């Protein structure tokens, strides 16, 4: 229901107009830090190499066919490896995985093989590494890719899923880890 003082002829701003306000990349990152998100490590393996990185942008797309999406910065090594390998696995972390998240986020400047050596991994259907004690691992083949700004939205068709007793879910908000009971 419209407010009695609302201007019925006023049109909402276009997408371009809305983005052109006093919005900076820094203020946008600060705003997004206030949104709680689950913590995931996305992995890949194949001709493009074995890679992994911590990500927050992951969600389901459809259950018919089962599909998910991730968003990755196009300048990352993981992005290049996924494009070459055409497969990825999303590993959802639980409380106690903060060190895994930090390692794959690049904290500590560990070489990629040292990041994987910190815990146990097993390949799923596509050959991607799945974290042995992840609460959820979703193994996918790349279905499509779209570019938005600095990132790619990569949709994957699910090939395999492994679920474990999740315990307390690891989330990230205001630049820090928290956990939620199951």
Image (cartoon, rainbow, N blue to C red):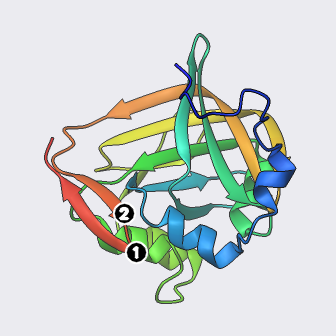
Residue 169 picture location, percent across and down: 25, 50
Label 1: few (<14), some or many (≥20) within 10 Å?
few
Task: Please give the label number shown on residue 175.
Answer: 1
**What residue is shown at x 70% (from left), y 73% (from top)?**
25
* Vertical side of 84 occupied by 117: above or below: below
Residue 162 vs residue 49, the one in the foreground:
162
For residue 120, say whether it is visible.
Answer: yes
Residue 27 vs residue 104, the one in the foreground:
27
Task: Please give the label number shown on residue 172.
Answer: 2
Residue 18 relative to residue 112: left or right: right
**What residue is shown at x 21% (from left), y 58% (from top)?**
179
Residue 146 picture location, percent across and down: 83, 41
* Vertical side of 135 occupied by 131: above or below: below
* Vertical side of 76 occupied by 159: above or below: above
Residue 181 relative to residue 47: left or right: left
Residue 83 picture location, percent across and down: 81, 50
Q: Are marks 2 and 1 in contact (CB under 8 Å)?
A: yes
Residue 1 relative to residue 144: left or right: left
How far apart are the alpha carbons under marks 2 and 1? 7 Å
Q: Secondary structure at mark 2?
A: strand
Label 2: few (<14), some or many (≥20) within 10 Å?
some
Q: Quadrant of the rendered structure where residue 62 is?
A: top right
Residue 75 vs residue 19, the one in the foreground:
19
Q: Quadrant of the C terminus?
A: top left
Q: Quadrant of the rendered structure where residue 151 is?
A: bottom right
Task: Please give the label number shown on residue 52.
Answer: none
Q: Secondary structure at mark 1?
A: loop
Residue 112 picture location, percent across and down: 57, 75
């Amino acid at each position: 229901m419209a407010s009695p003082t609302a201007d019925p002829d006023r049109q909402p701003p276009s997408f371009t107009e809305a983005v052109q306000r006093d919005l900076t990349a820094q203020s946008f990152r600060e705003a997004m830090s206030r949104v709680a998100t689950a913590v995931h490590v996305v992995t890949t393996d194949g001709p493009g190499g074995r890679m992994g990185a911590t990500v927050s942008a992951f969600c389901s797309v459809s259950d018919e066919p089962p599909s998910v999406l991730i968003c990755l910065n196009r300048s990352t090594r993981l992005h290049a490896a996924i494009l070459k390998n055409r497969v990825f696995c999303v590993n959802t972390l639980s409380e106690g995985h903060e060190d895994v998240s930090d390692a794959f986020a690049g904290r500590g400047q560990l070489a990629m093989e040292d990041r994987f050596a910190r815990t146990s991994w097993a390949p799923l259907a596509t050959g991607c590494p799945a974290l042995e004690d992840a609460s959820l691992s979703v193994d996918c083949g790349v279905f499509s890719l779209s570019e938005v700004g600095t990132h790619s939205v990569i949709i994957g068709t699910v090939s395999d899923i492994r679920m474990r007793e999740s315990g307390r879910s690891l989330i990230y908000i205001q630049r820090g880890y928290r956990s939620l009971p199951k």
